[in-house]
Amino acid sequence: MAKGFLPRHSRYDYSPITERKDYSFPGGKRLAFCITTNIECFAFGAGLGHDNAKSGEPQTQRNYSWRDYGNRVGIWRLFDLADELKLPLAHNTNSLLYDYAPQIFTRIRSRGDEIVAHGRTNSENLRGMWEPDEERLIREVTETFATNEKKRPTGWMGAGAYETSVTPDLLKEAGYTYFMDWPCDDQPIWMRTRTGPILSVPYPVEVNDSPMIVHRKHSGREFCDMIVDQFEEMMDQCERHPLVCNISIHPYVFGQPFRLRPLRAALKHCLAHRSRERVWWTRPGDIADFCLTLAPGIVPGS
């Protein structure tokens, strides 16, 4: 087969984890553990959005209100759970949520959590956008967060993790330090853009309640078993390589009482681990800030 037969991207080079330089997170920690929620708002009866019964259903009052449960009830239960367990959170957040549920941002600020820009609404995504339109959308989202929070977000997670061919370039040009759209690694890596590198922080498509429960129909307990198994295996693996264990939670999924109970148990299991002092309980932005302090050649792509 001729070299170059397969279409490829130029964002990063292949780098096996076994050949990388070792480092530790602050305080000698080996595993960076994050919980990232997804706080989303949707158009009523239009656009995109999950259905809890089956894929491909039209947008109705039923699936709209099921998702809105996350903003009205679910996220508040997750806030309380994080307070109970003294865990930091990051939140992939739609910018149009300011118009709908400003109280959520008050609680985020009071907790000192991180806001990760997550587009305007999950009723749309970036697929098929022309570059000028995408640039305007990213600028609008960024300015909305900057105006309301008095600081610009440093991280981006695309709605649905969708991109165009120029999204990393536009994010770098808009001033973002990191993004989480490429689930290619268990370590942060630097990716190329046309104006310099941007950091990719690990974010899961597997240990993510939306695909696992909504699409693959796993139970809440099965998903929480995944959290425990992911954590336990990474605790073993991180002795050889520093790793990121990022857990993705949607309030309309795990804010339901019957799922909240096994989630509490799973997180308590992680917090009680015999080697818990080796864990950095943190947020994606903190991981990105730490990577900026490392010498060139440590983080892949640098």
Image: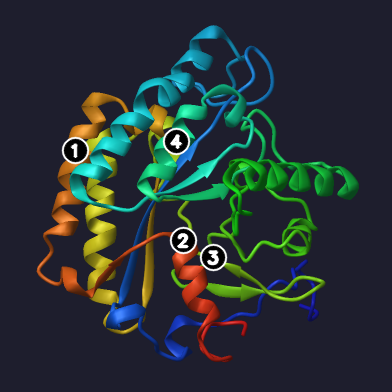
The span from disc 1 to disc 3 (Cα, nearest Å) is 28 Å
Identify the image quadrant of residue 195.
bottom right
> Mark 2: which amino acid?
Pro
Residue 224 locus on image (x, y percent): 25, 44
- Give the labeled residue for mark 3: 184
- Whichever of labels 2 and 3 marks the residue nearer the N terminus, that label is 3
**Local secondary structure at mark 2:** helix
- Whichever of labels 4 and 3 marks the residue nearer the N terminus, that label is 4
Task: Decide which of 235, 57 is in the foreground and name it.
Answer: 235
Quarter holding the C terminus is bottom right
> Mark 3: which amino acid?
Cys
Task: Decide which of 295, 256 is in the foreground and name it.
Answer: 295
The span from disc 1 to disc 2 (Cα, nearest Å) is 24 Å
> Mark 1: which amino acid?
Pro
Residue 106 has which mark?
A: 4
Mark 4 vs mark 3, foreground winner is 4
Q: Are marks 1 and 3 in contact (CB under 8 Å)?
A: no
The span from disc 2 to disc 3 (Cα, nearest Å) is 16 Å
**Residue in view at x 38 percent, y 34 percent:** 213
- Give the labeled residue for mark 1: 262
The span from disc 2 to disc 4 (Cα, nearest Å) is 20 Å
